[in-house]
Image (tube, helix red, strand yellow):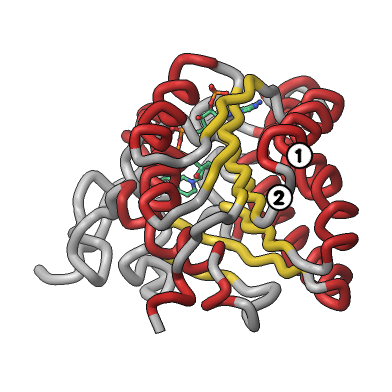
């Protein structure tokens, strides 16, 4: 049974794979056997991540890419096809948690809106579009979108992030609906609050411990590994258009970090 989870010989593109949750997924995917293209703007972190994967014997390439620019995305996918020969899995993980948060709506400029939506939603569309024809022609492929609990509820003064991540959940469904007939599936991972550099600026408004989370603790980046491997593997072949929540039960409990006290702990 565990053979179905092996990623031996699978070619995976992951965006934002140099830091935080992306880096943890890169570790898990490479340990499971995947070859990787790791894309983000800064070369340093993605090159380090690729080096770690190569040390395990995988092919791994860092490709500097701004995923808000569709021509850079197209180039990154072309490089993947040149270097790895195919794309089995695309993981749209790049996102922007930290900028433009905690502003009242009247202070959000057109530019804030565009950058936030481009980073959190258009990027996933560009990457999905760029791999779609190749996947359809091969009759197989998996697209995995990393959204957020904020894609399913409002957040205090968090505008583009909530709207972008909500759009990503819908992008998954529309991809799932339209591409499944060609053998290509799409699913969403919904992480709860997992402290990373990307969440530093939200520390004030988000849980600092597990008191409000049914499971009693915050998540760790490593928690993303197994679900990323599962959704990249043939073990998840019949799953399509779904959301996979990884939040210790936060959404199930209706926990909403509203940005003000009192936060009511699970146990007094
Ligand atoms: N941590 C959480 O609690 C949490 C919860 C729910 C969802 N998420 C989502 O999980 C994903 C990873 O977040 P994280 O917490 O791991 O934060 P992170 O460490 O800041 O990761 C974000 C990554 O996205 C990349 N990125 C940002 N803008 C980009 C652009 N324009 N082009 C290419 N790459 C770009 C960044 O690399 P460069 O700066 O080098 O480009 C960075 O590696 C995000 O989509 C986030 O919204 C996180």
Residue located beneath label 2 in the image: 87
Toward the viewer: 203 or 78?
78
Q: Nearer the viewer, residue 114 or 59?
A: 59
At 45% from the left and 56% from the top, the residue drawn is 191
The image shows residue 267 at horizontal and vertical percentages of: 13, 71
* C-beta proximity under 8 Å, tags 2 and 1: yes
Q: Position of residue 10 (x, y in %)?
A: 58, 55
- Determine if residue 162 is in view: no
- Measuring 54% from the left and 68% from the top, which residue is drawn there? 233
Look at the picture and state if 127 lies above or below 143: above
Relative side of 229 to 126, left or right: left
Near-viewer residue (236 or 263): 236
Does label 1 point to a residue whose CB lies under 8 Å from ligand 1? Answer: no
Q: Looking at this view, name the residue that lies furthest to the left.
A: 268
Count all numbered tags in the image, as a single digit. Answer: 2
Badge 2 or badge 1: first in the primary sequence? 1
């Amino acid at each position: 049974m565990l053979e179905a989870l092996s990623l031996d010989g699978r070619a995976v593109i992951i965006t934002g794979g140099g830091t935080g949750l992306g880096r943890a997924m890169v570790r898990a995917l490479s340990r499971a056997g995947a070859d990787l293209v790791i894309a983000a703007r800064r070369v340093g972190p993605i090159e380090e991540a690729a080096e770690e994967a190569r040390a395990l014997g995988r092919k791994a390439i860092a490709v500097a890419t701004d995923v808000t620019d569709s021509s850079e995305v197209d180039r990154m996918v072309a490089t993947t096809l040149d270097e790895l020969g195919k794309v089995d899995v695309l993981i749209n993980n790049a996102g922007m948690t930290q900028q433009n948060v905690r502003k009242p709506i009247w202070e959000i400029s057109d530019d804030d809106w565009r950058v936030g939506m481009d980073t959190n939603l258009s990027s996933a569309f560009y990457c999905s579009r760029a791999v779609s024809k190749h996947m359809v022609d091969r009759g197989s492929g998996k697209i995995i979108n990393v959204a957020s609990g904020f894609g399913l509820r409002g957040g205090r003064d968090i505008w583009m992030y909530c709207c972008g991540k909500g759009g990503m959940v819908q992008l998954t469904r529309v991809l799932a609906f339209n591409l499944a007939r060609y053998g290509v599936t799409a699913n969403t991972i919904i992480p709860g609050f997992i402290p990373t550099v990307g969440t530093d600026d939200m520390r004030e408004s988000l849980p600092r411990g597990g008191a409000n989370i049914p499971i009693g603790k915050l998540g760790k980046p490593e928690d993303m590994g197994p679900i990323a491997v599962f959704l990249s593997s043939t073990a998840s072949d019949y799953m399509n258009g779904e959301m996979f929540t990884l939040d210790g039960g936060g959404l199930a409990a209706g926990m909403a970090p509203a940005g003000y006290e009192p936060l009511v702990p699970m146990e007094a």
